[in-house]
Image (cartoon, helix red, strand yellow):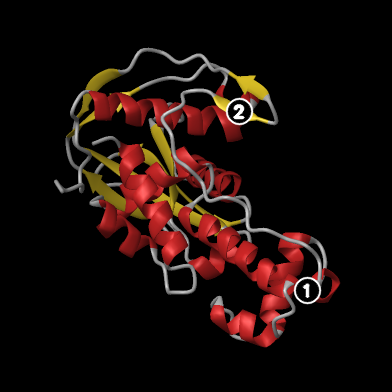
Amino acid sequence: MGYEVYLQKTIDHIEENIREPITIEGCAEAAGFSKYHFYRLFTMYVGVPLMEYVRKRRMAYAMQEVSQGRRILDIALDYGYSSERSFCRAFQREFGDTPGKFRNRRYAVPQKLMVTGNKSIDRGGLKMEYTFSDVKVEKLETMHVASSRAISPNPEEEVIDFMNRWRESNHIDPLARNFGFDIPVTEEQSSKGLRGYEYWVEVPEDTQVSEGVRLKKVEEATYAIMRITNPFSDPFESIPAGWRKLAEWANEHGYMPIGSQET
């Protein structure tokens, strides 16, 4: 069964429980994957993190009820906001104006997302193709890494800049391998436009770390590796497209990620 099937079940689950508490952990368990692997899969296929997608879908349903004249406080409480004020702030960030401006307007909730296996992305009618290397399997030996993470509107730049300064001040080899990846955030953090990112730098086992940096031991493992030509020329398209291709390759070749389970 392909990844798309599990992700579509998640999309359907969100639609059926749009007013109920929804968590990354719950969706990951339902799909049969670890939280972190599920988070990356959802983001690479859908284009936004899970809780950002949930927030946008809830706001679309809330907009429909606003346009139908329902009381704002009732709408706010039904969609998980603690007060009318917090809902109105979130509504204005999403739609550019207050709920009162949308009373008695025609509005239909956009159709729910249908996850497919398309390998090209259609944005506004413009097809965008990317160049990828062949996927290869490579074993990485056990290593120690200095790790830090950030949750902010621009976490990649923030944590990489922090770790580069830390690496320089601690005389870590500038050619040491480094790794970066998205990490999940809470629904509240997502609603504020925050994202999470963790960054690793390979270091000697006896490296002394300081505040904001943790030393981790990464056990030997086998990885599927692929390179993208000019990934930062359009990172919001090329990088998710690369992750999708890598996930499709793993799925086609029968590889199961660490932390996943058979269903």
Could you say which quadrant of the image residue 77 lies in? Answer: bottom right
Name the secondary structure under disc 2: strand
The answer, for residue 22, to whether it is visible in the render is yes
Q: Position of residue 19 (x, y in %)?
A: 49, 73
The answer, for residue 209, to whether it is visible in the render is no
Q: Which of 209 and 254 lies nearest the eye of the viewer?
A: 254
Image side of residue 108 versus residue 40, left or right: right
Q: Position of residue 81 (x, y in %)?
A: 59, 80
Q: Earlier in the sequence, mark 1 or mark 2?
A: 1
Question: Could you tell me the amino acid type at mark 1?
Answer: Pro
Image side of residue 243 versus residue 142, left or right: right
Image: 187 above or below 183 = below
Q: Which residue is mark 1?
A: 99
Could you say which quadrant of the image residue 153 lies in? Answer: bottom right
Q: Residue at x 51, y 46 (%)?
A: 113
Q: Residue at x 77, y 62 (%)?
A: 106
Name the secondary structure under disc 1: helix
Q: Residue at x 50, y 46 (%)?
A: 163
Packing grade of label 2 (10 A; few <14, some 14-19, many >=20) is few
Question: Could you tell me the amino acid type at mark 2?
Answer: Asp
Q: Which of 262 and 13 lies nearest the eye of the viewer?
A: 13
